[in-house]
Image (spheres, rainbow, N blue to C red):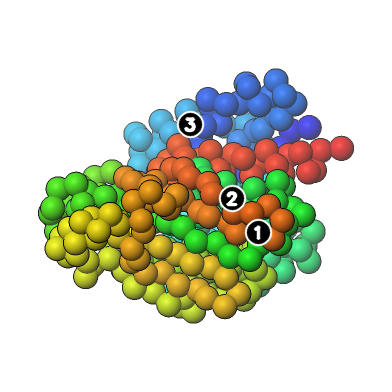
Amino acid sequence: MTLRLAIFGFGVVGQGLARMLQRKGAQLASCGIDLRLVAVADSKGVWVDEGGIAPQDAIEKKRKEGTVAMERVRPERVVADVPCDVVVDTTPTNIEDGEPGMSIMLSAFESGKHVVTSNKGPLALRFHALSERAEECGVHLMYEASVGGAMPIFSLVRCSLAPAHITSIEGIFNGTCNYILTRMRETGYSYADILNEARELGIAEADPTYDVEGIDAACKVAILANALFGMDVCYRDVSTTGISQITPEAIHLAAAGDFSIKLIGKVSPTELKVAPMLVPTEHPLNVGGTLNVASIVTDIAGTITVMGRGAGAVETASALLSDIVWIHRSVSP
Ligand code: HSE
């Protein structure tokens, strides 16, 4: 069967997904996973074509005209009318009210569409309201791309760790901070000196304060707590300390004792925390650069540690596509 997709949000991540559809379309089709892009929307409007939009045409239009809009409308107003099976929400994260992602998702559910998202805002604010509404409407809400980019966590727990009980998770959930701390250790420079380097990598949030003050990691801790521990929390419930007060001297002292300073997120039914912590150099959580890592502690499978690229257009698109493939499989007769 053909799964019709609409991408809402056509910035770095949305275009990354379009490129991925272009690159992987034939490979997936040969496995019976037929995907058709029928709509693309950005903040200026929407382009809908039930016959299919070639991903490269959407990317080209965006490049030339600054928008994909054929019709100038507020995208969240047209979600219900778009003839698709899956709405992919790649609109920017907004942690004040979750918009426009929140309205896009709710409207998708109400009109019987599955949602795949990389957008942390709505999930870090109102995870339960959203997942309950999806369930009431009989559709899937999938969010692998929202935590850890290409690094699988939710699918790993849902599939391979299905019989296990997860007791806690800890890890590095912000690539920008990890990059800054790694480079501080390598160069002896201050966090402010490295911040611009990190911004040039294109993985920092639009406002990098969210990265360095630990808010982005707190959003991910909240999403993990809600999704894997059945909690009902928002990112403000996470005890959060960022890395802006970490000095080159502190990094140097830690290194002399064979430790690294890492921004660690901890998730368990009794603790929701993001803070800089000392990690022994040989510890599995001591990963460098922009990498993310998560140690998932279980009752019967011991501790499973996964590591991978937590941000970037291709990596995030990889996670979005993985969720899309899962939906295709789950709805195929
Ligand atoms: N700013 C985030 C990071 C992007 O650096 O990890 C991925 O959520």
Around disc 3, counting alpha carbons within 10 Å, would you say few (fewer than 14), some (14 to 19), or many (20 or more)? Answer: some
Residue receiving disc 1: 298
Q: Residue at x 70, y 29 (%)?
A: 34
Q: Residue 19 shows which numbered tag? A: 3
Dot 2 or dot 1, earlier in sequence: 1
Q: Amino acid at mark 3?
A: Arg
Q: Nearer the viewer, residue 42 or 162?
A: 162
Q: Residue at x 41, y 52 (%)?
A: 283
The kind of secondary structure element at disc 1 is strand
Q: Residue at x 59, y 39 (%)?
A: 321
Q: Amino acid at mark 1?
A: Thr
The kind of secondary structure element at disc 2 is strand
Residue receiving disc 2: 304
How far apart are the two marked residues, 2 and 1, measured between alpha carbons? Answer: 8 Å
Left or right relative to 225: residue 43: left
Q: Residue 4 shows which numbered tag? A: none
Disc 3 versus disc 2: nearer the observer: 2
Dot 3 or dot 2, earlier in sequence: 3
* Distance from mark 3 CB to nearest ligand 1 atom below 8 Å: no
